[in-house]
Amino acid sequence: MHPAIMVMGVSGCGKSTVGAGLATAIGGCFLDGDDFHPPQNVARMAAGQPLTDAMRWPWLDALGQAVQAARQNVPVVFACSALRKRYRDHLRAAVPDLRIVYLDAPRDVVLARLAQRQGHFMPASLLDSQFATLEIPQSPTIAVRIDQPVAEIIAAIRRIV
């Protein structure tokens, strides 16, 4: 079984960018957790409403199944907010020996990124709810600050995972 690495953090912290770059660097595949949301979840977030836990469980189940299937063939890096410990625990139950990369994101840096991001369903208006929901992992595989170049973030992660 190949490794599975989750890149987690608040919306706009760079999960997809870092995750895709890390997957390329280790010769693996990248899965974006956003792609596994059902249309009603996307519509709700696009309307500026946070998801309920009842809406998250099926999404996390689908994502966990996809990661497990993909890691049969290659290492998998996936992006997922996984803001609460119980969401990470849910994914760990589906993906044994999951490695977690926490992107430590200062609010002002994320807000500036969200202001420039176009074509994404998650509005900047939900950023405060993201930070309010965030339970910083007590034992991630690695935590790395995002206020540095992407190449340096990926290099720091590769030294650990």
Image (cartoon, grey):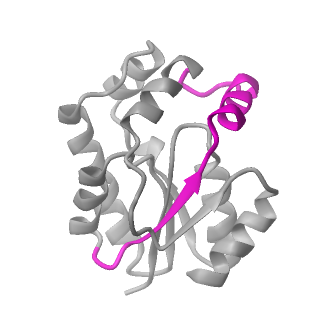
Taking the view exactly as shown, the residue that stands out farthest to the top is: 47
126 is within the stretch colored magenta: no
Task: Choose between 18 and 130: the one closer to the eye.
Answer: 130
Position of residue 135 relative to residue 29, above or below, is above
**Residue 83 x %, y %:** 39, 45
Task: Choose between 135 and 81: the one closer to the eye.
Answer: 135
**Residue 73 x %, y %:** 44, 81
**The residue stretch that appears in magenta:** 96-123
Task: Choose between 89 and 71: the one closer to the eye.
Answer: 89
**What's the residue at 29%, 43% (across, down)?**
59
Quarter occupied by the C terminus: bottom right
Task: Choose between 62 and 8: the one closer to the eye.
Answer: 8
Position of residue 42 relative to residue 4, above or below, is above
**What's the residue at 31%, 27% (across, down)?**
51
Position of residue 106 relative to residue 73, above or below, is above
**What's the residue at 61%, 46% (across, down)?**
105
Q: Is residue 56 left or right of residue 45?
A: left
- Quarter of the image holding residue 58? top left
111 is within the stretch colored magenta: yes
Q: Is residue 85 left or right of residue 161?
A: left
**What's the residue at 63%, 73% (across, down)?**
157
Position of residue 103 relative to residue 111, above or below, is below
Q: Is residue 21 left or right of residue 52?
A: right
Quarter occupied by the N terminus: bottom left
**Residue 130 x %, y %:** 45, 33
- Quarter of the image holding residue 90? bottom left
